[in-house]
Amino acid sequence: MPAFRYLQLDVFADQPGRGNPLGVVLGAEGLSAARMQALAAWLNLSETVFFLPPSAPGADYHIRIFTPASELPFAGHPSVGAAWAAVTRGLAHPRDGALVQQCAAGLLPVRVSGAADAPHIELASPPARRLQTAPGAVPDALQARAADAQVPELWDNGPRWWLLPLRDAAAVRTLAPDMAALRDWSNATDATGVAVFAAEDAAQHQWVVRAFCPGDAVNVPEDPVTGSANALIGAWLGERGVLPDGRGSYVASQGREVGRDGRVHVRVDAQGTVWIGGQVQCVIDGHIRW
């Protein structure tokens, strides 16, 4: 049985245990898609990425992203973690701080800064699209906490998240949703889940976010720290011209309610592209036989 180099990372974390875990399998070209899916299911992390040789012109590295149940075209924390692994394990070498990631969503630009052994990663999210899907029967407990005159909007950047601003940070922090109702609503509208958010004036962040996906990830109904949802929230704020203090960048806090304390750096550039980034910690570095 072949042994593969394996990393387990904590993404969007300034120290181990505060972010979102990610499995990383290097040199996975010997694995079929079915074997990748089976390993992701066995690891039972929210996502596992598999490194393959790049096949698209201009790509520096190539990943496939799997949840325990399915393959994803794009996800935020796996992409940030994969870029960190590519740089720190010598799989790709930035040119003037730039790399290109190949994944099922296409070719995504990556920016790398900081120390070579502890780089700060910033990745361009796929374009965000606001869909015209009607929200239908929004769970009562969720709509009751919505900000004035706000209703959920379905946005897509690979995953499809309902986005709903709540009336204040306390409403986000103390929300105890009916997971069964959220599951049924998400499944009925073909959504990954729902992300709620509000401004929070704190020393190290400006927004607070929570993301619930009980229909998509039964074992992880609240995602600890969510790159794709945070990127869509950045697009939502940018569309409305309400980025903090008019700047194009801010930090979002996510995960305290599930025992984490993640920080997602979000930047909306002049062209409207949303970049997400943060720190990554390596918790496990070894081999896995599969």
Image (spheres, helix red, strand yellow):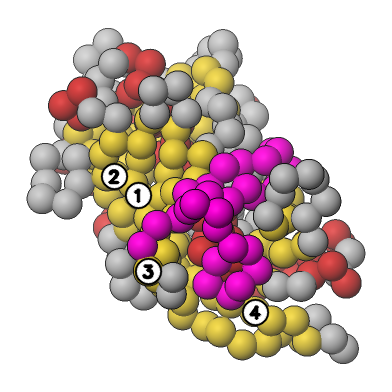
Question: What separation in Å lies between label 4 and label 1 (alpha carbons)?
Answer: 24 Å
Badge 1 crowding class, 10 Å Cα cut-off, few under 14, some 14 to 19, many 20 or more, is: many
Q: Nearer the viewer, mark 3 or mark 4?
A: 3
Q: Which class describes the residues within 10 Å of circle 2: few (<14), some (14-19), or many (20+)? A: many
Q: Which residues are magenta?
A: 87-114
Q: Residues within 10 Å of mark 3 (few under 14, many from 20)?
A: few
Dot placed on the residue nearer the N-terminal end, 1 or 3 = 3
The residue lying at 32 percent from left, 14 percent from top is 240
Cα distance in 3D space between marks 3 and 4: 22 Å
Mark number for residue 218? none
The residue under the point 64% across, 49% down is 101
The residue singled out by tag 4 in the image is 6
Q: In the rendered image, which residue does mark 3 sit on? A: 115
Residue 196 coordinates in the image, percent (x, y): 35, 35
In the image, which disc is placed on residue 252? 2
- Residue 264 has which mark? 1
Q: Is residue 231 above or below residue 176?
A: above
Q: Position of residue 220 (x, y in %)?
A: 51, 57
Relative to 18, is 167 on the left or the right?
Answer: left
Choose mark 1 or mark 3, whichever is in front. Answer: 3
When the figure is inspected, residue 171 is found, relative to residue 35, above or below; the finding is above
Q: Earlier in the sequence, mark 2 or mark 3?
A: 3
Q: Are marks 1 and 2 in contact (CB under 8 Å)?
A: yes
Q: Amino acid at mark 4?
A: Tyr
Residue in the foreground of this view, choosing between 113 and 73: 113
Q: Amino acid at mark 2?
A: Ala
Label 3, secondary structure: give it.
strand
* Cα–Cα span, label 2 and label 3: 23 Å
Q: Is residue 107 magenta?
A: yes
Specify whether 17 is left or right of 246: right
Residue located at (22% from left, 15% from top) = 148
